[in-house]
Image (cartoon, helix red, strand yellow):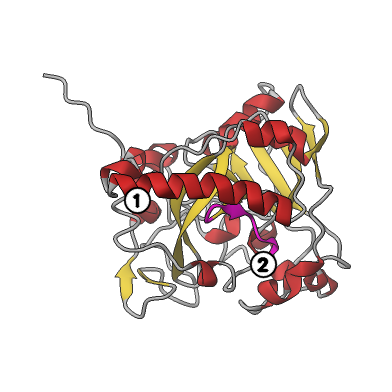
């Protein structure tokens, strides 16, 4: 007998939430996205809003084990050095970022290079809402309902060629809008990258919103990456450039501290940061600590990407 079992990330919210609450939340999300887009001056075209499709939450029993992180924490406790190094700085300073208009340059080993207006980049893709946990190297985590679309869909849209082995992302570099860039804390602009098979994994998400609303500036507006099995610094924010390359790109934190921040940055309780343990974590809003899970609890979906690799050397 063939028994089909689903991956944990495929479990739908309607299976674990009362149906009436589920339907009310879906209706609220659709309204909230429309209202918040208008209120924030984030000018997605009417065609994109008309095509808006938010699928049920993908609730992961391994990565959740509790409530969502309160929105007040998600939007006020952030790592976004472009606006300051203190966790409270982004929420205080990010109002200076102008997200409309916004464009993304696509270049490198692909058949569809060019400069794309944000609305032209996102409108072909129906939005989904996914609950993912984001884990940071400082041993804290949050559980966030993101709105976005698969990174794989955007990559297919750009038609990378056979030489494209990596995809690189770059954050806006504008010290007038991002005052943290006036300090040489990092080598600006911020750059991150993925191997192509990582980028094509179904968990990789291009996020445009959270909690039923358009992304706040401090959370990476208007377009950011979310990679739930990696440490948070890989989930690059406020993206203005995407480049496909044959060789592995140099990335910001790996250049800044190669002994502390590896290219892969997979959540791994067996590989400690040189200055603290990664074996346990604290979810924001809670006092107790939890055991860190391999690949942040998403091993079933991503472990095959690293088969045969020494994850202590390729950290």
User: What kind of element bears circle 1?
Assistant: helix
Q: Which residue lies most toward the top here? A: 1
User: What number is the disc on residue 240?
Assistant: none
> Would residue 252 be counted in the magenta stretch?
no
Q: Nearer the viewer, residue 298 or 266?
A: 298
Q: Is residue 290 left or right of residue 109?
A: left
Between residue 226 and residue 34, name the one nearer to us. 34
Residue lying at 66% horizontally and 60% vertically, measured from the top left: 216
Q: Identify residue for label 2.
A: 80
Residue 213, magenta (yes or no): yes
| Depth check, front residue: 149 or 107 | 149
Q: Is residue 66 left or right of residue 45?
A: left
Q: Quadrant of the N terminus?
A: top left
Residues at marks 1 and 2, CA–CA distance in whole angstroms: 34 Å
Mark seen at residue 21? 1
Residue 146 picture location, percent across and down:
52, 51
Residue 245 seen anywhere in this rendered image of the structure: no
Q: Depth-wise, is mark 1 or mark 2 nearer the camera?
A: 1
* Magenta part of the chain: 211-217
The structure residue drawn at horizontal position 44% and vertical position 73%, both measured from the top left corner, is 284
């Amino acid at each position: 007998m063939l028994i089909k079992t689903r991956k944990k990330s495929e479990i739908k919210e309607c299976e674990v939430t009362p149906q009436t609450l589920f339907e009310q939340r879906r209706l609220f999300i659709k309204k909230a996205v429309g209202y918040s887009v208008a209120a924030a001056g984030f000018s997605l075209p009417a065609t994109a809003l008309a095509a808006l499709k938010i699928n049920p939450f993908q609730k992961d029993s391994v990565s959740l084990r509790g409530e969502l992180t309160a929105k007040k924490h998600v939007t006020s406790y952030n790592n976004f050095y472009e606006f300051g190094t203190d966790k409270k700085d982004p929420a205080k300073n990010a109002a200076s970022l102008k997200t409309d208009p916004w464009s993304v340059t696509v270049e490198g080993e692909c058949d569809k290079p060019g400069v794309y207006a944000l609305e032209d980049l996102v409108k072909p893709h129906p939005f989904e809402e996914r609950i993912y946990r984001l884990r940071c190297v400082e041993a804290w985590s949050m559980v966030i309902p993101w709105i976005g679309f698969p990174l794989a869909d955007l990559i297919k849209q750009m038609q990378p060629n056979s030489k494209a082995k990596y995809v690189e992302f770059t954050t806006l570099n504008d010290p007038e809008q991002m005052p943290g860039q006036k300090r040489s804390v990092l080598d600006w602009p911020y750059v991150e990258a993925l191997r192509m098979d990582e980028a094509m994994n179904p968990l990789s998400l291009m996020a445009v919103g959270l909690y039923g609303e358009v992304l706040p500036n401090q959370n990476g507006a208007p377009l950011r990456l979310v990679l739930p099995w990696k440490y948070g610094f890989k989930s690059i924010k406020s993206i203005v450039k995407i480049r496909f390359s044959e060789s592995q790109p140099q990335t910001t934190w790996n250049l800044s501290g190669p002994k502390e921040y590896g290219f892969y940055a997979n959540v791994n309780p067996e590989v400690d940061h040189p200055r603290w343990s990664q074996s346990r974590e604290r979810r924001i809003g809670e006092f107790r600590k939890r055991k860190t899970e391999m690949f942040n609890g998403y091993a079933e979906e991503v472990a095959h990407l690293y088969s045969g690799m020494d994850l202590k050397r390729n950290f």
